[in-house]
């Protein structure tokens, strides 16, 4: 590797384990802080062997909305010069738009909640007329479940003051009652299943955010060890196949795809695609291995000069793979800053 890898990111804690694994393996890399980054659009070659996009759409909830659009422009520039990018401009476009995700589900014939997309709060009631209540109103640019509101009746929706978030667009979507009070997140790496987790929701909750560090009323954050249980899970083969099709169509090298099983008909419904995947906390105890090791495997391969071939061996790490001392220390530091008691 003659040039360093670049990690484009915004969240101050989520990727400390990634940095630790890169350092453990002596992979040369640079941290690109999306909230304070600059590039020269006249340069026709990237100084990096690979740019790894770890930018989160939830940056707007941390006061870094400008970083979202700067990252989009930077990734478009990299795409234009043919730079080597993991989860580049195309995947990031899907990450930023729940409307685009729903259109992708529809195009692929993948089961998903019935949805209308609106850009005027006054149109939400009309948009919900053909839907079955309860319904959710979701900001198009989400992240960590931010801004989602549930309505049990059209009267509740009519009386609400709606906030459509960053781009003034929202989804009005049927709320799927979750069978067994749980949802599933399927993590894919290099087009193959890495792992899946099942997250139990707080009874009566509607927000289906399973990512690390979701801190929202009524939502379990068991991924980070502070709420109801989270466990490794084996999704049905047909669900995994659909998740792979979604990832391939979106061009995502790594992603977390979420679905819920409707308690009324027993069928799975996909509802979210996350190009940003910060992985499950305490992974060795929850899923039996450290997925950041697998991610760095892919990074090193994509950054190399030879041809790239990714297969299922990336997901075949031995159970209970032991974290090295540096990575464990970084994880402990991050958990301490978040007030997580071991």
Image: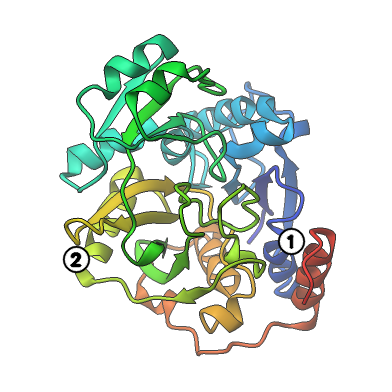
Q: In this view, does 8 lie above or below 265?
A: above
The quarter of the rendered structure image containing the N terminus is bottom right
Nearer the viewer's eye, disc 2 or disc 1?
A: 2
Q: In this view, does 61 lie above or below 315?
A: above
Disc assigned to residue 218: none
Q: Is residue 308 above or below residue 82?
A: below
Report, in whole angstroms, how far the alpha carbon at label 2 lies from the one at label 1. 34 Å
Under circle 2, the secondary element is helix
**In the image, residue 122 lies at what x, y percent?**
40, 10
Residue nearest the viewer, comparing 194 with 333? 333
In the figure, is residue 331 to the left or right of 94?
A: right
Occupied quadrant, residue 16: bottom right
Per the image, the residue denoted by label 1 is 16
Q: Residue visible at 48% across and 60% down?
A: 201
Residue nearest the viewer, comparing 271 with 162? 162
Label 1: how many residues lie within 10 Å, few (<14), some (14-19) or many (20+)?
some
- Residue 166 seen in this snapshot: yes
Q: Residue visible at 79% across and 63% down?
A: 334
- Residue 308 seen in this snapshot: no
Per the image, the residue denoted by label 2 is 238
How many numbered marks does the figure carry? 2
Q: Is residue 129 above or below residue 337?
A: above
User: Which comes sooner in the sequence, label 2 or label 1?
Assistant: 1
């Amino acid at each position: 590797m003659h040039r360093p890898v670049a990690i484009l990111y915004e969240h101050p804690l989520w990727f400390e384990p990634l940095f630790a694994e890169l350092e453990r393996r002596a992979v040369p890399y640079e941290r690109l802080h999306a909230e304070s980054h600059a590039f020269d659009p006249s340069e026709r070659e990237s100084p990096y062997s690979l740019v790894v996009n770890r930018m989160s759409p939830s940056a707007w909830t941390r006061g870094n909305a400008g970083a979202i659009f700067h990252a989009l422009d930077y990734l478009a520039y990299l795409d234009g010069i043919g730079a080597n990018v993991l989860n580049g401009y195309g995947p990031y476009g899907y990450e930023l738009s729940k409307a685009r995700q729903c259109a992708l589900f529809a195009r692929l014939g993948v089961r998903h909640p019935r949805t209308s997309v609106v850009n005027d709060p006054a149109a939400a009631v009309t948009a919900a007329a053909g839907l079955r209540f309860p319904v959710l109103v979701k900001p198009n640019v989400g992240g960590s479940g931010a801004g989602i509101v549930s309505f049990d009746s059209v009267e509740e929706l009519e009386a609400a003051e709606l906030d459509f978030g960053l781009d003034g667009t929202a989804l009005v979507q049927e709320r799927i009652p979750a069978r067994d009070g749980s949802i599933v997140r399927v993590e894919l790496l290099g087009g193959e299943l890495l792992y899946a987790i099942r997250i139990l929701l707080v009874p009566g909750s509607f927000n289906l955010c399973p990512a690390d560090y979701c801190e929202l009323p009524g939502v379990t954050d068991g991924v980070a060890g502070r709420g109801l249980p989270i466990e490794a899970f084996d999704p049905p083969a047909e669900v995994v196949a659909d998740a792979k099709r979604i990832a391939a169509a979106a061009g995502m090298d790594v992603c977390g795809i979420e679905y819920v099983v409707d308690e009324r008909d027993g069928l799975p419904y996909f509802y979210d695609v996350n190009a940003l995947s910060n992985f499950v906390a305490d992974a060795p105890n929850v899923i039996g291995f450290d997925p950041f090791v697998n991610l760095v495997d892919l990074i090193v391969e994509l950054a190399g000069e030879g041809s790239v071939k990714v297969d299922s061996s990336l997901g075949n790490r031995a159970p209970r793979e032991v974290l090295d001392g540096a990575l464990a220390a970084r994880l402990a530091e991050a958990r301490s800053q978040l007030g997580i008691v071991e």
